[in-house]
Image (tube, rainbow, N blue to C red):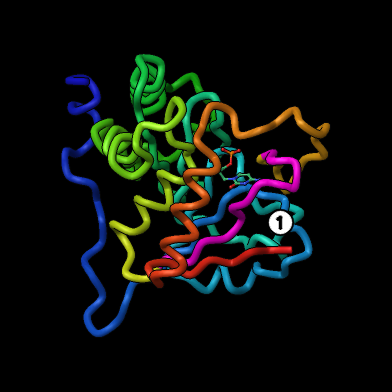
Amino acid sequence: MSRVFQLIPANPPLEESIPGRCRTCAVVGNSRNLLKSKYGPLIDFQDYVIRINMGHSKGFEADVGNRTTHQVMYPESSSQLDNTTRPVLFTFKMRDIQWIIKNISTQPSRKKPLFNKDLVMVVNPAFMRNIHHVWLQRKDYYPSTGFMSLVLALHICEEVHVFGFGADSDGNWSHYWANEPKNEVKTGGHPGNVEFEMIMALTKHKVIEFYNGR
Ligand code: C5P
């Protein structure tokens, strides 16, 4: 961790609030309910567009938009980011920390860096623990990246618009870009039902704006 603190600024480079108006966020999960939704323009309209893991635009612009200001990811789910996208890195295991160090240390041999190291934001593991223990009552193994991204958005934006969350009718977290065999995805160790109930409660109380998709 001390190496990480040598490489990244201790304070995240968050912009100041915008006087006289709300900062808006689109949190874009990877659900297949985005397909044919035509949410693209609405997603791109928000100040921040937060995508998750392998969530991407190419080929799906009409439904998912084409701007990405933040990409939340782990070493196992990382993808090549463009130079202006801020990588948001949650850490809970040694590999996460080693991977950050590897990718932000100077590596002249690497032709194209995975992301712009000057934009990296590393989230304190205590944040993840809080979400698991307090928000999700310690259900299942750990919170999904999507749910953590949503809670993060509540901290950095005044208005949070949530897209692409929701399992298919068999309870699988299937992805908008893949044709996955039924029942092979499930919710992978995350408390999918508890998370979704919480998202519905936040919607009911108008804390977030939730978009069902199709
Ligand atoms: O599967 P992956 O973790 O990459 O998807 C990103 C997030 O989107 C998940 O962590 C989950 O919170 C949400 N998701 C969902 N329903 C799906 C697929 C993903 O709610 N069908």
Nearer to the camera, 132 or 17: 132
Going 48% across and 19% down the picture, which residue do you hit? Answer: 109
Report the side of 150 relative to 29 (left or right). Answer: left
Q: Residue at x 33, y 40 (%)?
A: 131
If the image is split into quadrants, where does the C terminus sit? bottom right
The N terminus lies in quadrant: top left
The secondary structure that dominates the magenta segment is loop
- What stretch of residues is rendered in magenta? 160-172
Residue placed at 41% from the left, 48% from the top? 86
Which quadrant does ligand 1 occupy?
A: top right
Q: Is residue 56 magenta?
A: no
Q: Is residue 9 above or below residue 60?
A: above
Residue 84 visible in image: no
**Neighbourhood count class around disc 1 (C-alpha, 10 Å): few under 14, some 14–19, many 20 upward:** many
Q: Using residue 145 as the reference point, say whether residue 30 is left or right of it.
A: right
Q: Position of residue 195 (x, y in %)?
A: 48, 46
Q: Residue furthest bottom?
A: 20
Q: Is residue 7 left or right of residue 98?
A: left
* SS label for mark 1: helix
Q: Position of residue 161 (x, y in %)?
A: 48, 66
**Which amino acid, mark 1?**
Asn
Queried on whether the Cβ of the residue with tag 1 lies below 8 angstroms from ligand 1, the answer reads yes
Q: Is residue 165 magenta?
A: yes
Tell me the residue at 45%/69% (across/down). 204
> Circle 1 is placed at which residue position?
33
